[in-house]
Amino acid sequence: MLNETTTMKPANLAIAAGTAKTVEKKVMENGTSTTTTAITPTTTSTTTSTSPKTTPMTEISFFTSSDDIFSLDQQPKQSLTKVSKLDLQNPGKIIGLTVRDGQLLHVAKSHGEIDILNSTSFEFLRSLHTSTTIHRIGYFEDGKMAVNEAINSTLNIYDVEGRVINQLGIEYQVLDLKIFNDTIYVLSRTNSTVYVYDKKLELTSEIKLSEVPKESCNFILPTESSLYFSCQSGIIKSSSNGTIIGSASIPGGSYSLALLQNVDEIWAAQRGRAEFHVYSEDLKFVKRVIADHEETALWSNVVKQDDLLYCLDYVINSITVYRI
């Protein structure tokens, strides 16, 4: 079993075939040595065979033991107060959000248009018209953008006005794209591989998870020393080289949606509800953060600016703003 850090219910590892024995290994993170536990599959046979033995692939699965006693309703709660539900002037499928310069809310749409609104009055200011469609988008510190165009399978760098200044063809499908410290992290659909690029679209590394999740993990969150993956029923934490160093899940938790770093906390959007499950950086459950009115939601993108949260529901194509 991996070194799992949730206090309520450890996420468990399921082996695809064979029996298992545990083997401890050392993982270096932030210059310190951390002991984790890996599952090593072994096979037994009652017949003699000349065929070489094969080692089954180790896979991660999250589940709740029936003897766990945990009530989500009894956990600490924090309320979100709804400020506004934005009505955009220009139609189109919303892909991503960000706040620039502390006061400009950028709303990117799939057909390549980016609306710019005042981030507090929500007044429409202007639009950027790009030359590509937008599947995923992230922003650099200087306002330039990294964009995945799904139709032509490319990564693009836009200048601050939305003009393409660099382009790279890719041979994989993109699930998520994030920019952290001006480095681009792209999550592919294949084997939870993360491709890392610099601002010139030069590939600097490929991060492959040391174990393959059995369920979908559609969103990532890069931080200073770790990567977090939001999966269907749990959160995975890996080192910068892909070694899994923690995983967490709680009864009733269903994710595979947006992740947000808020100081030293990781906020995971709860599937189907207007709420977050909040974990510490080492994946101990902290609290629930819940909208003041019971609502359904599927938040694929969440941006925090001061005490405001901008939440994109990709199914109903709407942006709701809350005050923390």
Image (spheres, helix red, strand yellow):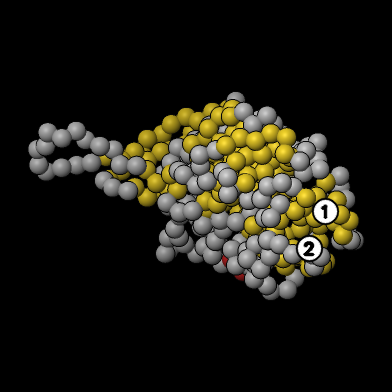
Q: Are marks 1 and 2 in contact (CB under 8 Å)?
A: yes
x and y, in percent, of residue 119 in the image: 86, 55
* SS category of the residue bearing label 1: strand
Between the C-alphas of marks 1 and 2, the distance is 9 Å
Label disc, if present, on residue 208 of the rendered structure:
none
Label disc, if present, on residue 90 of the rendered structure:
2
Q: Is residue 35 above or below residue 123?
A: above
- The residue carrying mark 1 is 127
x and y, in percent, of residue 72 in the image: 59, 66
Q: Residues within 10 Å of mark 1 (few under 14, many from 20)?
A: some
Q: Is residue 258 left or right of residue 248?
A: right
* Observer-nearest of 290 and 260: 260
In the image, farthest residue toward the front: 131
Circle 2: residue type:
Asn
Q: Is residue 288 above or below residue 38?
A: below
In the image, farthest residue toward the bottom: 294
Circle 1: residue type:
Ser
- Earlier along the polypeptide chain: callout 1 or callout 2? 2
x and y, in percent, of residue 257 in the image: 60, 56
Q: Quadrant of the C terminus?
A: bottom right
Q: Is residue 78 above or below residue 201?
A: below
